[in-house]
Amino acid sequence: MKVKYDAEVDVMRILFSDSEISESDEEKQGIILDYDDKGKIVAIEILNASKKIVNPKSVEYEIEGV
């Protein structure tokens, strides 16, 4: 998984795989889900991220239940 934030265009992208995107849906305004040809989520894009996320330049990763 990769998390990328582009401050210049204020977009955060969370990538779950390197699969080719075959379909995208804007579930809610400014939240785009990208799918591969099998219907699995490839990425989530958050437009105007600085208005929707407290600190888009900071990422914390945690695994529970291990």
Image: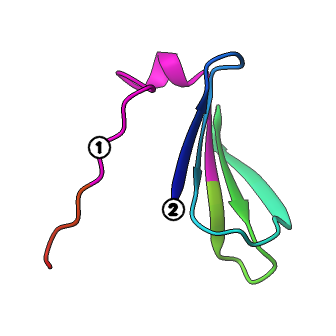
Residue 43, image quadrant: bottom right
Q: Is residue 55 above or below residue 33?
A: above
Give the extent of the magenta segment.
44-61
Q: Say what secondary structure mark 2 lies in.
A: loop
Q: Amino acid at mark 1?
A: Glu
Residue located at (44% from left, 25% from top): 57
49 to 32, vertically: above or below = above
Disc 1 from disc 2: Cα separation: 13 Å
- What SS does tag 1 mark? loop
Quadrant where the C terminus is found in the figure: bottom left
> How many other residues sit within 10 Å of disc 1, few (<14), some (14-19) or many (≥20)?
few
Say which quarter of the image contains residue 65. bottom left
Residue contact between numbered discs 1 and 2, judged by CB atoms under 8 Å: no
Q: Residue furthest left?
A: 65
Residue 52 drawn in magenta: yes
Q: Which label sits on residue 1?
A: 2
Q: Residue at x 81, y 64 (%)?
A: 21
Which comes sooner in the sequence, label 1 or label 2? 2
Q: Is residue 48 magenta?
A: yes
